[in-house]
Each structure stands twice: as structure tokens, then as C-alpha cells.
Amino acid sequence: MGHIEKAIELNPNNFECHRMLAEVFLAMHDFSLALEHSQEAVSINPNDPRVLSIFGELLVKTGSIDEGIKCLQKAFDLDPISQGQTNSDKRVAALFTAYMLAGDEESCASIFRKIRLPRIETWLLQVHLAGQQEENFSDSPWYREGLGRYRHSDWPMEIDRFHLNNPDLDARLKRDVERFVTTGMPVA
């Protein structure tokens, strides 16, 4: 943190430092400072997909969902396979989370089918959506694969790492873990 702050002191227009500070403050659940730094980064470099991605994610998680989805879509359009990735799952998963928070289950279903290997956040949010619909998904390949991969996760820590900024949803996800994951029994 000290190094990033020093870099910004030397060059306040360093969008990469503002982007990194946005990521750090998001990890610390300081959504206000994260949003502030992501806004600064996007004002300096509005076409960098990494900047657009963190800005869009923060907009979604602070209530400006439609604007956030536009940023996340633009990040995907500019660079579908983000740095260090081998496929578009990371960018697509960000859109999935945004549409889930928007309550757009139809878009979520469409997007989920495009994800090759759902990350833990995307998988649990899909479990949550399927459970809300009281859909029997226990034999679905996506559920069984994810259950095998994630069953023994530290769920409170993982849900905290989703940085959803929504305590009610966090609590529902923790209940879903108990109902659908730790018991292995999705729907009676």
C-alpha cells in the first residue's frame, strides 16, 4: 500500500496505481474509497479493460447496476480474455454476478452456459438462483462438478471474498451452503 501511495504521490495521474488501490480497497470492503480510485482510474484511461472491469464491478456493488453492466460489457468487448487468463470465464463471471445482483435470472442462465469452469462465486450464486426456483439440480453436471471441487471450502471466508456489499445476500448464501452444499442435498 505504501508503494502504491508513493507512486501516486509522484504521479497522481497514474491510472494503474488508482486501479490497484481500487482493488485493495475492495478487498478491504472499503467500497467508498475503492469506487473513488476506480473513478479516478477510468477518468484517466477510460478504455483500459482492467480499469473498466474494476469500475464496473464497484458500480454494480454500490447500486449503479446498469452503469456497471455497461462497463463490464465494454471491458469484455475490448478484451474478452483478461491478462493472465486462458479463457473469457473471468469477464463473463463478472457479468453473471452483475446480472444476478440486478435480478435478471434469464441473462444469468444464458451467461452461465458460456462459462467453462465456474469459479466458486459464480457456482454458489448459480446454486442460490437454482435453489430459489426450487429446481432440482442435484443431477446437473455443473452442480456435481462444483460440489466435488468446492465442497470443503471455507465458506464464510469465500463468501466474504465475493465482496458483494450486501449483508442480506451474504446471509442467504451462507444458508444455501448449509442447505445445498454441506449436506449435498439440493432439493427435497
Image (spheres, rainbow, N blue to C red):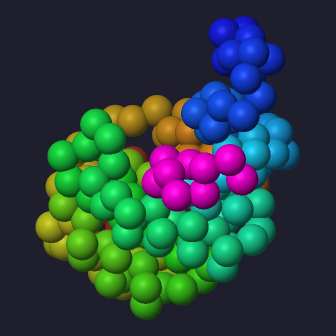
Q: Position of residue 87 (x, y in %)?
A: 21, 54
- Residue 71 drawn above or below residue 162: below
Residue ID at (75%, 46%): 40
Q: Residue at x 42, y 79 (%)?
A: 108
Q: Nearer the viewer, residue 154 or 60?
A: 60
Q: Which residue shows up at 28% across the image and 37% down it?
A: 84
Task: Residue 185 in the image: state x and y as whole percent.
Answer: 33, 63
Residue 23 is covered by the magenta coloring: no
Nearer-the-camera pick, 72 or 115: 72
Q: In the rendered image, is residue 68 in sight?
A: yes
- Establish if 109 lies above or below 164: below
Q: Say which of 78 and 32 sits in front.
A: 78
**For the image shown, how many numbered marks are present on the structure?**
0
Residue 27 shown left or right of residue 93 in the figure: right
Q: Is residue 154 above or below residue 107?
A: above
Location of residue 127 in the rendering, given as x and y in whole percent from the top left corner: 40, 67
| Quarter of the figure with the C terminus | bottom left
Q: Is residue 181 left or right of residue 71?
A: left
On the rendered structure, is 88 left or right of 12?
Answer: left
Specify the quadrant of the image occupied by residue 139: bottom left
Q: Position of residue 136 (x, y in %)?
A: 30, 81
Which residue is the extreme one toward the bottom?
A: 106
Check the picture and name the quadrant holding the N terminus. Answer: top right
Q: Quadrant of residue 16?
A: top right
Kindly identify the residue that appears in the image at 32 percent across and 73 percent down.
112
Query: What span is in magenta?
Result: 43-51
Residue 23: tell me if it is visible: no
Residue 162 lies left or right of residue 140; in this view the side is: right
